[in-house]
Image: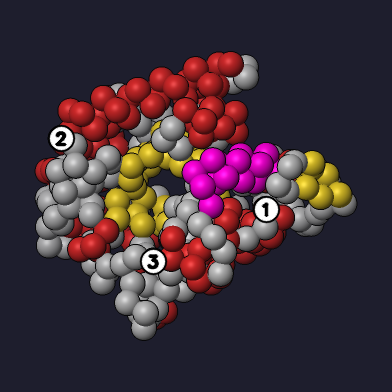
């Protein structure tokens, strides 16, 4: 059985020394990974609040950590060219010694578009750019030098010296609809979703299971074994406050594991924007309490 992975999103909207201290604590507590956002501006921010650039922040964290994996949840193709995204991913993979996971989604923040001075892309345009970006990343991060698409293309591309991880850094694709789930079935090493807001747990799980079936069908259609794709969920909502206590977290993890999820990601509750993010009530010191009181036994139970 696939080993349980438990990660923490540590949003980089804190002063640098506060943020890196939190990352080092998460590593010391025994969690498997740390994730950051990829935004220029975020709806939870006041204009004067810090929001460090994701890849730069991860590269610095990579030099100061030793074990924990690091990743973007999720990089937005609208913010940068696919080749620059590949270069950034390769660089963090090199600095970390092969501990980087490239999480990507379709993106589409209104505030980011306004900051860039561009019109907000339509859902179809975002999906098309997402698809071509992932296709190019899969080529160039494996050492390929050319890609031709209607939105992105290039000849003589390189991300030398390449990735530490082979055949490339893992791609973690956030996908919820049929088109993006087909893309995940083709390319994802890890499929990521989230606890749907405003639904009770039974309906959340039923929706996640239906998406997982589409993922499996897409993988089979291109000759992949669906079992080779890990399944990740950003846990918690106001309707399902999985961080209210270690017991609530354990119950949620077991229910997600029962339908096939291998990876659980929790939003670190102790950051200024959490109340406006919507991942539900969190108990006091819950990140530490989960790690110290629950994780070893939970991992053994699901081994």
Query: In this figure, what is the number of numbered marks?
Result: 3
* SS for dot 1: helix
At label 2, counting other C-alpha atoms closer than 10 Å, the crowd grade (few under 14, some 14-19, many 20 or more) is some
Residue 43 horizontal/vertical position (percent): 34, 65
Q: At 24% from the left edge and 32% from the top edge, which residue is drawn?
A: 204
User: In the picture, which quadrant includes the C terminus?
Assistant: top left
Q: Is residue 170 above or below residue 10?
A: above
Disc number placed over residue 200 in the picture, else none: 2
- CA separation in Å, label 3 and label 2: 27 Å
Residue denoted by label 3 = 42
Quadrant location of residue 3? top left
- CA separation in Å, label 3 and label 1: 22 Å
Give the main secondary structure of the magenta stretch: helix
Residue denoted by label 1 = 82
Q: Is 134 one of the magenta-colored residues?
A: yes
Residue 13 in view, yes or no: yes
Q: Is 42 one of the magenta-colored residues?
A: no
Relative to 170, 241 lies left or right: left
User: In the picture, which quadrant includes the N terminus?
Assistant: top left
Q: At 17% from the left edge and 52% from the top edge, which residue is drawn?
A: 280
Is tag 3's residue or tag 2's residue first in the polypeptide sequence?
A: 3
* SS for dot 2: loop
Is tag 2's residue or tag 1's residue first in the polypeptide sequence?
A: 1
Residue 282 horizontal/vertical position (percent): 15, 56
* SS for dot 3: loop
Q: Is residue 15 above or below residue 103?
A: below
Disc number placed over residue 19 in the picture, else none: none
Magenta range is: 121-136
């Amino acid at each position: 059985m696939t080993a349980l992975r438990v990660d923490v999103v540590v949003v980089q909207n804190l002063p640098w020394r506060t943020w890196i201290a939190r990352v080092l604590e998460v590593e010391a507590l025994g969690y498997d990974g740390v994730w950051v956002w990829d935004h220029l501006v975020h709806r939870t921010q006041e204009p004067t609040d810090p929001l460090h650039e994701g890849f730069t922040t991860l590269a610095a964290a990579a030099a100061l950590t030793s074990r924990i994996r690091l990743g973007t949840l999720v990089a937005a193709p609208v913010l940068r060219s696919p080749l620059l995204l590949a270069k950034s991913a390769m660089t963090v993979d090199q600095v970390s010694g092969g501990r980087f996971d490239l999480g990507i989604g379709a993106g589409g923040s209104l505030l980011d578009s306004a900051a860039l001075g561009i019109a907000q892309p339509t859902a179809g345009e975002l999906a098309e750019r997402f698809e071509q970006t992932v296709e190019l990343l899969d080529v160039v991060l494996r050492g390929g030098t050319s890609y031709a698409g209607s939105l992105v293309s290039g000849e003589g591309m390189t991300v030398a010296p390449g990735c530490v991880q082979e055949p490339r850094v893992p791609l973690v694709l956030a996908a919820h609809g049929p088109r993006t789930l087909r893309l995940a079935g083709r390319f994802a090493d890890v499929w990521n979703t989230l606890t749907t807001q405003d639904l009770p747990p039974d309906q959340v799980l039923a929706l996640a299971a239906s998406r997982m079936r589409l993922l499996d069908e897409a993988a089979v259609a291109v000759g992949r074994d669906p079992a080779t794709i890990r399944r990740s969920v950003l846990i918690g909502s106001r309707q399902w406050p999985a961080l209210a206590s270690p017991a609530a977290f354990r119950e949620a993890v077991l229910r997600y594991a029962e339908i096939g999820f291998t990876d659980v990601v929790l939003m670190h509750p102790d950051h200024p924007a959490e109340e406006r993010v919507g991942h539900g009530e969190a108990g006091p010191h819950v990140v530490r309490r989960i790690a110290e009181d629950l994780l070893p036994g939970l991992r053994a139970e699901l081994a």
